[in-house]
Amino acid sequence: MNTCQPWDPQCYDRKLALRLESVRALFILHPPYPDPYAPSDFDLTDNSIARLPIVPVLDPVRTARPSPSATGGTTVINAKFYGRNDRLGAAPWSTNFAAASSLRHIRQLGIDVSSGSRIASGRRTSIDRKKQRSGERGVCALFGMESGRPKDVGILAIDIYFPPSCVQQEALEAHDGASKGKYTIGLGQDCMAFCTEVEDVISMSLTVVTSLLKKYQIDPKQIGRLEVGSETVIDKSKSIKTWIMQIFEVHLFGKLVEYGNTDVEGVDSTNACYGGTAALFNCVNWVESSSWDGRYGLVVCTDSAVYAEGPARPTGGAAAIAMLIGPNAPFAFESKYRGTHMSHVYDFYKPNLASEYPVVDGKLSQTCYLMALDACYNLYCSKFEKFEGKQFSISDSDYFVFHSPYNKLVQKSFARLYFNDFLRNTSAVEKDAKEKLEPFSNLIGDESYQSRDLEKVSQQVAKTLYDAKVQPSTLLPKQLGNMYTASLYAAFASVIHNKHKTLVGQRIVMFSYGSGLTSTMFSFKLQEGQHPFSLPNIASILNVSEKLERRHVVPPEKFVETLKLMEHRYGAKDFETSRDTSLLTPGTFYLMKVDSMYRRHYARKDA
């Protein structure tokens, strides 16, 4: 094994070549001097470098005299490098190199790409323009960039956490005195996850972020932006993101505790269930921008959805999702086709800050959801047609993933897209479906949203396509309930779980909705990805089946009792929880107490 301690004097003037698997590149390193703060060993054969979204390069501030050249299609960079005076984490490259994300950063390395010269020992020397351009293309290839910009930016990795406690909807029907099938058929739900007194959106966030970083072996220092989407208000000033920073300030993966990374941009985004999508867009836009410093973005969607006693209560749920963002992603954004619709409406809102229960106009909210879906779909289609030169229909996407307050609305939503295809181009639907939908072709305005007959017929004619294109996304939303910001991405995780073996080359269209209202339709193009960001490994780490099997089903009476306790403690101070972690898996964070100054204290269940 080629192992070198670069800061060891015995490594002086020793050249060590490393050929990267992902690109044809060669770094020849000249370790210049010992650094007493460096790690005891430096293994160039480990796979830590493969875990970075791009190939790391030399620190643009402390590097001397790099020069690019093109040799047989292989980019060679000869440079001296200097270690920083801090200890390294799991991926040693990440703290000794700052990644260049644009040609501007390459210029900071000392490469003058505009004048055809390189800077050496304080003077400019002419270089061959052809070689220069070739060198630039090679450097851009190193960072997964096209024309100086990162390419295939999207989701590299995803993980989910949900509470182990759940209540069955069928049992809740009987407890509430509802007609049989009202929750299971009328809403289309099976189970509902909920937080007990020892869990909340902060503990779930800490758990899922720690899990993702550990399972993908990501050093917290590799995170440059952290965005949180949530509508669950714990504090009107302090963001959930600041609680999560505990993971980045102090390494929690081992017994050794050391200070880590506080250079992490981003805060919380809030607008009902749309906050997670806003957080995702913020991270993606950052990676695609000139502000990107080459590190990963991290998105957290976390919510606990609870309702007062009544017809809305069975539409609750709870979960947290974490997503790692960077270039060369297996789930790459098709940003050109994004369609957004936003408007002012009172369909679902939380004006009473003394309560976490919302005010809901159920009928209006469903209408607003479908109206927003129509607007976003038409915008998405028009943008697709502009760039592709052909009409878009549901046949052009392999899967559709919807924000899922309850499954019945998802069924109606896909049927609505089918009806839109019929209105836009009757040849896009089958002859039998065309004949059944024809009587509704002249409905205008709200008429089509209120027509029960259209709703029923459109679901019937779209049933076969629904089973193929939507059903694979419904597992987690039906089992966990409405997770607000996490709902859309739990549905996305369900597709990965069910179809990861056949996803390469396919398209997934996503529809995100948040009451009030905000909505966007966007899509991913899927590729295999490189380990550990490969589709099979992502599905394995999600481990959906085992997580569902580990849940503990509680009777409705216990569920109601828990909600009453949580209602009493909402906004309260100076109390301690039971600290009962018997249902929690090792590594799960939990709430211990809220002190007399409203400060929340969390702990982590040991293995």
Image (cartoon, helix red, strand yellow):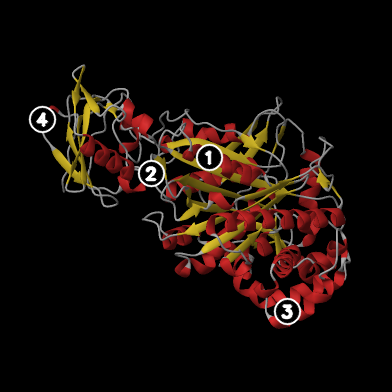
The residue to which callout 1 is attached is 285
Residues tagged 3 and 1 counted as in contact (Cβ below 8 A): no
Q: Which mark is in front, 4 or 1? A: 1
Is residue 579 among what the camera can see? no
Callout 3 amino acid: Ala
Callout 4 amino acid: Asp
The residue to which callout 4 is attached is 13
The residue to which callout 3 is attached is 433
Residue at image point 68% right, 64% down: 478
Residues tagged 1 and 2 counted as in contact (Cβ below 8 A): no
Up/down of 171 relative to 238, above or below? below
Residues tagged 4 and 1 counted as in contact (Cβ below 8 A): no
Label of residue 55 in the image:
none
Q: Distance between the residues labelled 3 and 1?
A: 41 Å
Task: Locate residue 279: give its quadrant.
Answer: top right
Residue at image point 26% right, 25% down: 63
Label of residue 145 in the image:
2
Task: Locate residue 411: give its quadrant.
Answer: bottom right
Kind of element beneath mark 3: helix
Dot 3 or dot 1, earlier in sequence: 1
